[in-house]
Image: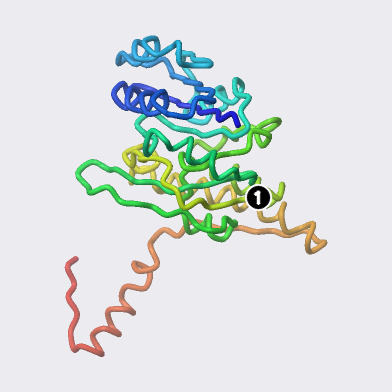
Amino acid sequence: MKISIITINYNDREGLKNTIESVVNQTYTNIEYVVIDGGSTDGGKAIIEHYKDRFHYWVSEPDQGIYDAMNKGLDHITGDYVLFLNSGDILYESKTIHNFVLYNRTEDLVCGDVIIRENGKEPKKKIMPDTLTFDNTLKFIVTHQAIFHKGYLFKEKRFDRKYALIADWVFYNEALLFENATYFHLDLCIVYYDGNGITSNKKIGRKLKEERIAYINEMLPRYLEPRVGKKIEISVCLPKKSWYQQNKRRIQNKVKNIFGKTDNHE
């Protein structure tokens, strides 16, 4: 079984080095490794050139963001399964790919677990769901670094670049809802995931939610109309305040009735 691994990078020299070393030190050898660098100015290209003999393909040039870089990588892979391992993410151990292959799974999306590492925090294990549906993708952020994707899924499709933050999430929902993709959860740690990436930044959390809602408003009618036989109009919107903030006074009054007082720190 051939495993394609795609690493994208931009100005994360040390993270890139750690990621590359975790791949080239795998005991499993039938790996096709592709590295896409966005024209880094921090010495990342020198790291790539140092390991270039271990790559199936590499390039260092400006791109249009994360998903443009991932799409570039997909143009150069031929593996049975594809794993996206961004700079800063590290395969769990030297036998990770070997252990995955031993399972001999055939599903379209085979997902393991991750260890999340964030600055100043203890690493924590994130166990992926045993089933992957639209309902639980809404509640559970799927980490693409832990998913082995059947290569055929990308034969004619790429990540939709109109979504700057959620194109991978959109891809999974499209595959599950419209292409009947199959899924399996492995009880196997795949990666140390760098939890300090762009989508972990709270400042862009609202933008991420807005993109999700835009997709839902576009997708649900497309999915439901053929099933109900009539045109559907859906308009989901992002609340301006959290549920607690919207109901804060009512909650505080109930607490006050029970305990006689409530603390208000505002």
Q: Which residue is mark 1?
A: 182
Q: Quadrant of residue 195?
A: top left
Q: Nearer the viewer, residue 70 or 244?
A: 70
Depth check: 27 or 217 in front? 27
Amino acid type of the residue that numbered disc 1 sits on in the rendered structure = Thr
Residue 192 against residue 1 in the figure, above or below: below
Q: Horizontal placement of 65 versus 91: left or right?
A: right
Quadrant location of the N terminus in the rendered image: top right
Give the secondary structure at mark 1. loop
Q: Name the residue at 42% across, 31% down.
A: 86
Where residue 76 appears, x then y in whole percent? 60, 20
Of residues 18 and 201, the one drawn nearer to the viewer in this rendering: 18
Whole-percent x, y for residue 116 in the image: 33, 45
Asked if one can make out residue 165 in the rendered structure from this viewpoint, the answer is no
In the rendering, at what x and y percent does residue 182 appear?
Answer: 65, 50
Place of residue 78 in the rendered image (x, y in percent of width and height, measured from the top left): 63, 24
Residue 90 can be seen in this image: yes
Residue in front for this viewpoint, 129 or 179: 129
Placement of the C terminus among the 4 image quadrants: bottom left
Q: Quadrant of residue 32?
A: top right
Is the residue marked by circle 1 packed among few (<14), some (14-19), or many (20+) residues within 10 Å? some
In the displayed structure image, the side of residue 228 where residue 147 appears, left or right: left
Kindly identify the residue that appears in the image at 31 percent across and 21 percent down: 13
Residue drawn at (51%, 21%) of the image: 34
Residue at the location (57% across, 27% down)? 71
- The answer to which quarter of the image holds residue 246 is bottom left
